[in-house]
Every structure is written in structure tokens, then in C-alpha cells.
Image (cartoon, rainbow, N blue to C red):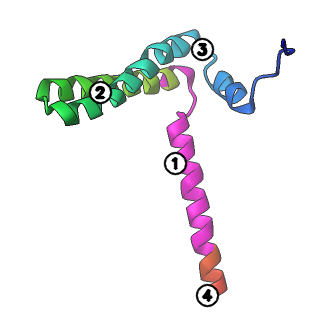
Amino acid sequence: MIYSPQPPSPLVNDWMERHRNQASFALHLIGIPLTIIGTLLLPVYVVMASIPLFLLALTFFLGGFGLQFLGHAVDGTEPGEIRALRTWWGRRRARLESSRVHAG
């Protein structure tokens, strides 16, 4: 069965909005796979206990994240991880303040 094209999800639209600069987009195209490969190599390191493999995984992971943060610096936008931490911290603070009000 053939379905008509669906509009992109709000997450995709948000991601595209924050990555408009071509250089930022290119840095993410390189950085995201490197970060994923670095993450996937860590369990292999645990099994093999290979220091060179650990250093390779760490280099891929940190290098990939570095490229993505550089892309956001070029684009002038806030990285998603920072946005998520700010949101989490804001909700946590609101819960703590709310519990203080109810307790006192």
C-alpha cells in the first residue's frame, strides 16, 4: 500500500531549524556518526580490555561531539544536549520550589 507523504515531525523541524548553516550541517554529518561509532566501540573495549581500542573509541566519541559543538558555534545556536540539560534543570528547580511551598 502506498501512503501519501507525511509532514516531518516537530523534532525534525526543530533540528533543521537549528542547523541551517551548511558548514554546521556538514560538521554534524561527520560528528554524529563518529560519536555513535565511539559509543558502540566502548562495549567492545570492555570485552577485549584493549587500551588502544579504548583510546580510539574515546577519540571518536569526543571528536564527534567536538565537531557537533563546533557546528553549533558556527551556526550560533545552542546544542540540543545543553537545551535538554537546561530544561531538565528548570523542571527540577520548579519541583523543588513547589515542594518547599507545600511543605512550609
Q: Tell me residue 51's x, y (percent).
A: 12, 29
Q: Residues within 10 Å of mark 4 (few under 14, many from 20)?
A: few
Q: Which residue shows up at 58% across the image and 29% down it?
A: 77
Measure the alpha-carbon separation of dots 3 and 4: 49 Å
Q: Tell me residue 71's x, y (percent).
A: 49, 20
Amino acid type at circle 2 is Leu
Sequence-first disc among 4 and 1: 1
Q: Are marks 3 and 4 in contact (CB under 8 Å)?
A: no
Location of residue 21 (image quadrant): top right
Q: Is residue 51 left or right of residue 26?
A: left
Sequence-first disc among 4 and 2: 2
Q: Which residue is mark 1?
A: 85
Q: Tell me residue 75's x, y (percent).
A: 56, 21
Measure the alpha-carbon separation of dots 2 and 1: 25 Å
Q: Which residue shows up at 72% across the image and 26% down it?
A: 13
Location of residue 63 (image quadrant): top left
Magenta residues? Answer: 73-97
Measure the alpha-carbon separation of dots 4 and 2: 47 Å
Sequence-first disc among 2 and 1: 2
Mark number, residue 21: 3
Q: Are marks 3 and 2 in contact (CB under 8 Å)?
A: no
- Give the quadrant of the C terminus: bottom right
